Image (cartoon, rainbow, N blue to C red):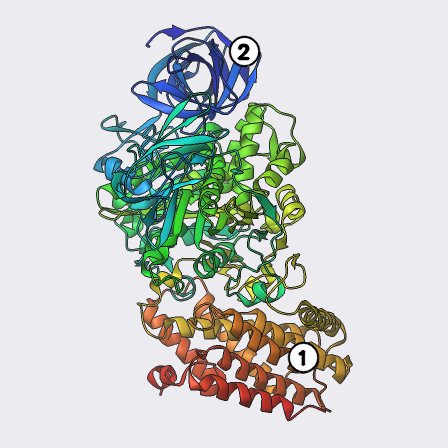
Amino acid sequence: MQKIYTKIESIVGNVITVRAEGVRNSDLAEITTSSGKSYANVIKLDRDLVSLQVFAGGQGVSTGDSVRFLGVPMRVSYSEDLLGRVFNGAGQPRDKGPELTDNLINIGGPSVNPAKRIIPRNMIRTGIPMIDVFNTLVRSQKLPIFSVSGEPYNQLLARIAMQAEVDVIVLGGMGLKYDDYLYFKDTLEQSGAMSRTTMFIHTASDPTVECTLVPDMSLAVAERFALDGKNVLVLLTDMTNFCDALKETAITMEQVPSNRGYPGDLYSALASRYEKAVDFDSAGSVTILGVTTMPGDDVTHPVPDNTGYITEGQYYLKNGHIEPFGSLSRLKQQVNKDTRDDHRALMDAMIKLYAAFKDSVEKKSMGFTMSDWDEKLLKYGNLFETKLMDLSVNIPLEEALDLGWQILADCFEKNETGLKTDLISKYWPK
Amino acid sequence: MANNIGHVVSVNGNMVNVEFENAIAKNEVGYIVVGDTRLKSEVIRINNGVAALQVYEMTEGIAVGDKVEFSGELLSVELGPGLLTQIYDGLQNPLPALAEQCGFFLQRGVYLKAIPDRDWEFTPVSKVGDIVVAGDTLGTVPEGVFTHQIMVPFDLLGEWKVTSIVEKGKYNVRATIATIENSKGAKKELSMVFTWPVKKAIKCYDERLRPTEPMVTKVRIIDTFLPVAKGGTFCTPGPFGAGKTVLQHMESKNSDVDIVIIAACGERAGEVVEILKEFPELIDPKTGKSLMERTIIICNTSSMPVAAREASVYTAVTLAEYYRNMGLDVLMLADSTSRWAQAMREMSGRLEEIPGEEAFPAYLESKIAEFYERAGKVRLKDGRTASVTIGGTVSPAGGNFEEPVTQATLKVVGAFHGLSRERSDARKYPAIHPLDSWSKYEGIIDSAKVAEAGQILRRSNEVNQMMKVVGEEGTSTEDYITYQKGELLDAAYLQQNSFDAVDAAAPVNRQQDTFSVMYDILKADYDFEEKNDVRNFFNQLRQAFLDWNGVPQDSPEYEKMKSSLISLYKGKVR
């Protein structure tokens, strides 16, 4: 298996083909070029013609370069030593630490048997009222942040990472701006969360193929931590870059594109990653929080669209805050019945009133006269936006609920809120 | 046939090309031998002496030259007692048993017996000397609340004579219970289990009938306005988050059929887990037993191999047809057919076929039609009627119904329950759009009256659109009343409160009662001057209606609230 092949037949984009025998699908190979060594993996076999995608890219690969097949699929080292470290998409250190080669595990492993999953039941507290109160994040949930480029999604992600009560954080960065990578690194180091964090970072200037490996690397590691009883939070930013990298490879491989150039298996490709989110019945859990930037704020774009069909809700980040309407946590019902008895009712009442506020704003902008009720709603809406929706607000759930009652009391009479009498008598600020 | 082998010549994603020597059939199952695992795959094309196989597993590690063993059989499922309550993957692998053997993960290449090895209390129906044909009953076993008929395998041709049959007693499911012989002297030993190729419809019945009897789902908007018939087909397209799966879960819980088969095809695993954990706790009002006893779940979630996803809907519908042949009414729900279509697309791309619209294969429409055509109400050979009803969700890209899968589905189904983003955002459940959707079946309520109510809804919607431009001030009181009537119908009849135990499921007689009151309110002529009065009046009516909807039918409150509701509206009639 260690035979070296030196006859590269074609180099198209990041994909090279070489004539070789005894090669297995998905096997890893090492290519030695004039500019150094790079890994590649087998993506297609046709008799003795082997197609490989080169992690470092096809640039500078010569037809005379040598290819050595390693006889193993792509793997990543797994141990506690990963914590506090930063790697690139191919699993090599990005920091100044040593290369890890012990206890290698396969990436992109099999899917969890649905019969072994359990119904999610633990809330993850983030200190952000728009999440904790209105769209609670649940352990083992997979949830993307839908965002227009330019929104502070990475800041939001970093804040959740620092505040969430989890044992291990795995950050997968795809096509990150170098500044953003440094921002994550600095923020996590300053908060002391770095010691429980592993990062797999592909920056915008790195080879595209490495981008496609980041989610698999991150999730393979996360899954192992979870099997060892840890509660793991995986942050993936930005999944749209990942999809674009897949698109690039698919086009190179002359696959028929399905929608706006994306390959037909985009849904499956995303699902096989997101579905790694799991709560094991006798071990830890994997929670996935991703970022999906929407080109042109278009939710029907193939990437957010396919993502929405896979994930358990989404957070809409727009104009610097999490939108109460487009956002949805499909699992919130599983946990918000056990937090505090007013949680669900207050959440519904406040959202309904906020919707009414939006109507009043529209009426006002169209020049219709404002009634007393409209004025109350306008006051309410402004308080709601500044005291709860603002992303800088950082309070625990209970405090956020109390604040909610306070806002209601500041704006309305008791019977205008649509809340049940018993809750009002219990929580209405005296 | 066991030593019919071939060798891998190329691997591309989940498609493998194989060279072979002896005869092989299209759709035959082959096993690719990788080390000590055997990966199940199916021949989908044979071209120039090379067979293209779609592999039902991950193709990692397959090498050129690997051996392929052809089985000589088409992709089949096992049929027999013990199917109910099971949870299978798309290839009928029992998932709980797999979990016991392999732990947390789905290990590839492990195939277990679909039907559990156990004894059943067999009661013979046929006697020695009887002449039987495929589909005839040899005997019965009690499977939960059902009498499971042990039938002559559907693939036997012509007439056969029973030469021996066991006496009443306990027998293993795979033990021989009867032997039969035909005029040519061919002999067969029969057990309670036989196999059937999933892609072939089971046709052991006398004739197909027109689906006329409504299948009650206890969802008012469906049963009254957009009914589904037993043996009919319906589809539920909708954007993500519109509640397709929630609605389907409701249908699977409340539909008045004997057996429900759920195919979770390429969707979230978490949703299946909810069914798995919830159904055993719920009581089926029809039988008094747990809902799970009438349910089979075929679960090929989105992260499981794509090719098996394609097989899963066929597996599900084959099981449905099997139980139909016992004279039962079966509902098969597929969530989501788009994922199934995408699996076909993926395969078609690998086969380098010329793509159709959005890269779906040209045969997409005929495959969808073929699938839905497996639904139907039939008269069995013994005169009983039975049915398979198929409901499929569609997940159109971008929520746009003008896409190939939705359009191809709409051509062949009998009812269209289109979910709208607008309604789901407004937290209206079910989010079925009442004006865009349609049904070709007869419902539980006089269709002329339903049409009148629908007319008011349509008119109300028009007034609403108009009001957005001219404001309330520019609308006549008469139009405003029509608008409010439509809103009332929507809020108090079309929507249901899924969290309210009573309102979540409305039985037929209750729907008829509620509708007759609603109809009278809609048809009445009211005397109002001010729009504010109109609004207040309809707000009151709505509140009274919602309260009434939440009261159990057998409580004394029910009639009281009904009459107070009636006197409330009669007070304002002109």
Q: In what quadrant of the picture does the N terminus of chain A appear?
A: top left
Residue B68, can we see it?
Answer: yes
Between B92 and B265, the one nearer to me in the picture: B92
Residue at 46% over, 51% down: B328
Residue kind at label 2, given as amino acid type: Gly
Residue at 62% over, 74% down: B489
A57 with respect to A344 (left or right): right
Q: CA distance from mark 1 to mark 2?
A: 69 Å
Residue A66 place in picture, x, y as percent: 42, 9
Residue B95 place in picture, x, y as percent: 32, 41
- N-terminal label among 1 and 2: 2
On screen, residue B5 above or below A223: above
Q: Chain of mark 2?
A: B
B472 with respect to A189 (left or right): right
Residue A169, can we see it?
Answer: no
Element class at badge 1 = helix
Tell me the number on the disc at residue B491: none
On screen, residue B550 above or below B188: below
Residue A71 place in picture, x, y as percent: 33, 16
Residue kind at label 1, given as amino acid type: Leu
Residue placed farthest to the bottom in the image?
Answer: B571
Q: Which residue is mark 1?
A: B522
Q: Chain of mark 1?
A: B
Q: Which residue is mark 2?
A: B49
Q: In what quadrant of the picture does the C terminus of chain A appear?
A: bottom left
Element class at badge 2 = loop
Q: Are marks 1 and 2 on the same chain?
A: yes
